[in-house]
Image: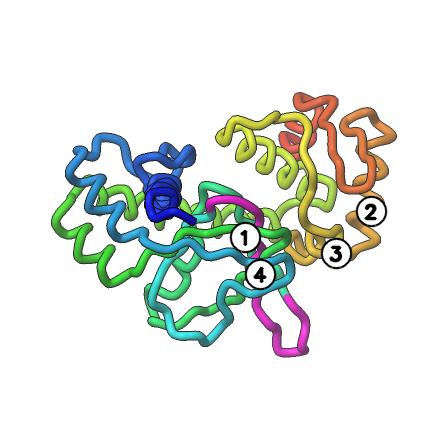
Amino acid sequence: MPARNVTAKISLEVIKTACSNCNLRELCLPLGLEPTELERLDDLVSTRRRVKRGEHLYRASQPFDAIYAIRSGFFKTDVLTEDGRDQVTGFQMAGELLGLDGIGTEFHTCNAVALEDSEVCTIPFPQLEGLSREIHTLQHHFHKVMSREIVRDHGVMMLLGTMRAEERLAAFLLNLSQRFTARGYSPAEFYLRMTREEIGSYLGLKLETVSRAFSRFQEEGLIAVQQKHIRILDTPGLKRLMAQQGR
């Protein structure tokens, strides 16, 4: 291959990798960064990593040294319970961050597994921490991200503690709808990357209970289900179901 073509190819890869040219920039990055500050952040995100379906991005007890911005694909996080079961703790999609669980102890506390062929941007945490001290907008943004994770954890605790099975599934589907909307996708039609068993693990429900709830939603005209393809037919109906919580 001529040297000029090689150079052009490398330059194109750099452009594709850079945060300043990423179509997920609005989701991952704070608004208001100056061009020079964005260039410094670009320098940090120097590598992308492809993770095939079923592969681990990282494992529990592995030393923590980076966080990961999901560029494409879908992940689940899980932990191994004392009786040997995998307990799903979350599902993450493009534009979201993975690896924040390791900040406190410097070791990862859960596993991160790709649910489909995925790609992440690796952000070395020590360098990010140093840059955040210099760029207060960036520091504030990551405080917001960590706060959002805490709020999400509290939301899951509420799901498991106070909601009936069908309310839990309605909340789960509405949450996915909101997250897909934020990424410019349809809020009413999407493909579930996770299995019903994994949904049950996350929501604290048995597989049979999840299947029954899906069937009831379909019978009542709330959703249409074709294997893992979901169409939400009645968003207000799902929200009304949520409003029944605590009655």
User: Which mark's residue is nearer the viewer, 4 or 1?
Assistant: 4
Horizontal and vertical percent position of residue 46: 32, 53
Q: Earlier in the sequence, mark 3 or mark 4?
A: 4
Q: Is residue 166 above or below residue 64?
A: above
Label 1: which residue? 157
Indicate yes or no whether the magenta region holds residue 81.
Answer: yes
Give yes or no for contact between labels 2 and 1 (Cβ–Cβ under 8 Å): no
Q: Earlier in the sequence, mark 2 or mark 1?
A: 1
Sequence-earlier tag: 4 or 1: 4
The residue identified by callout 3 is 197
Q: Position of residue 247 (x, y in %)?
A: 66, 35
Amino acid, disc 4: Val
Mark 4 near mark 1, Cβ–Cβ under 8 Å?
no
Sequence-earlier tag: 2 or 4: 4
Which disc, if any, is residue 211? 2
Residue nearer the viewer, 83 or 18: 18
Question: In the image, which is nearer the foreground, mark 3 or mark 4?
Answer: 4
Residue 147 seen in this snapshot: no
Structural distance between the alpha carbons of marks 3 and 2: 9 Å
Which of 190 and 157 lies nearest the eye of the viewer?
A: 190
First to last magenta residue range: 71-86
Instruction: Categorize mark 4 by other alpha carbons within 10 Å: few (<14), some (14-19), many (20+).
Output: many
Q: Which of marks 2 and 3 precedes in the sequence?
A: 3
Which is closer to the viewer, label 2 or label 4?
4
For label 2, the crowd category at 10 Å Cα-Cα, with few meaning under 14, some 14 to 19 and many 20 or more, is few
